[in-house]
Amino acid sequence: MPRRHLTFRQLETFVTVARLGSFSRAAEALHLTQPAVSIQVRQITESVGLPLFEQTGREIRLTAAGQELLRTARELDDSWNRFESAVDALQGLKRGRLRVALVTTAKYFLPRMLGAFCQRYPDIDIELEVANRARIVERLRANEDDLYIMSFPPEELDVVATPFLDNPLVVVAPASLPLPAGPLSLADLAVHPFLLRETGSGTRKAIDRHLAASGLSLKVKLALGSNEAIRDLVASGMGLSILSRHVLDDHPEQEGLRILDVVGFPLQQPWSVVHLRQKILPLPAHAFMNELLSAVSPANPGE
Ligand code: PGA
């Protein structure tokens, strides 16, 4: 039997026809035309030298040779899977260490993704560092981790940065504060005290940039390094704030908060996954980065 003519693709097509008992359903499942499926089955039949299917009425059934081929194709599939795992293990994807440093606002979604990754690769150890942007940039400069998640990749360092998810910043007020519903301007709100993130945080950098561009200043009553503390202080009526939407629940009103409709808001800036350009990324870091980029909807930095 001229087995060098057999291809994995033909085998896959044959297995799909056998599994679904129909050429047309197999064509649909494989996103092929029915003639393409028939041709591949004919080619594989010619290589084997015996019919693989027999037709009884509208049904097709495997012949004895077809059953042998199906069993063999499944064994080949198992062997190939074992081979892929062996290659993964040799390359170190199954084992090893993944070091990710992220800005505080990203901690509301990233650990969930890391959790799924850990389940898939239980032998990869994860080191996670959460800090404000200034501290994350220091770590990047010192090459302490594999990957970094942040909004403003530092321009002074030679990095590769890929935006992947929007991090909208919204204006929040205590739900109890009587304010008109319609679009407000930040200048209208400047009479109220604000609680903002500390200098050095990416959130604060985005706010300061916006204020500088619009020639406004806010009465900053308190600057602090915790998104949660700010959120709770706003809910208690202490003032207004500008926070990442990710810091708030799906229903902020249930937490005593209201997202205000303010002209120019939300401030949009995407988070990027960043690494030093000259860094040779270990396989776990590659795998996680690919997962991150394919799992979330692509960010649109221009919006
Ligand atoms: P931060 O960073 O947690 O330091 O505010 C936010 C960001 O870079 O998006």
Image (cartoon, rainbow, N blue to C red):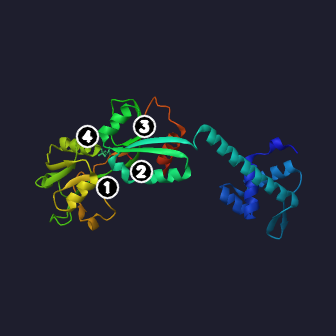
Return the residue at label 3.
145
Residue depicted at 50% across the width and 32% down the height: 280
Give the distance between the C-alpha atoms of the residues marked 2 and 4, in whole angstroms.
21 Å
Task: Give the percent coordinates (x, y) of residue 231.
Answer: 25, 57
Q: Is mark 4 within 8 Å of ligand 1?
A: yes
- Of labels 3 and 2, earlier in sequence is 2
The disc label shown at residue 247, or none: 1
Residue 85, above or below 192: above
Please report contact status of discs 2 and 4: CB closer than 8 Å, yes or no: no
The reply to whether residue 260 is in sight is no
- Of labels 3 and 4, earlier in sequence is 3
The disc label shown at residue 200, or none: 4
Left or right position of 40 against 50: left
Q: Residues within 10 Å of mark 1 (few under 14, many from 20)?
A: some
Q: Residues within 10 Å of mark 2 (few under 14, many from 20)?
A: some
Give the distance between the C-alpha atoms of the residues marked 3 and 1, in whole angstroms.
25 Å
The reply to whether residue 27 is in sight is yes
Left or right position of 86 against 69: left
- Of labels 2 and 4, earlier in sequence is 2
Task: Give the percent coordinates (x, y) of residue 62.
Answer: 83, 62
Amino acid carrying mark 2 in the image: Leu
Return the residue at label 2.
110
Give the distance between the C-alpha atoms of the residues marked 4 and 1, in whole angstroms.
18 Å
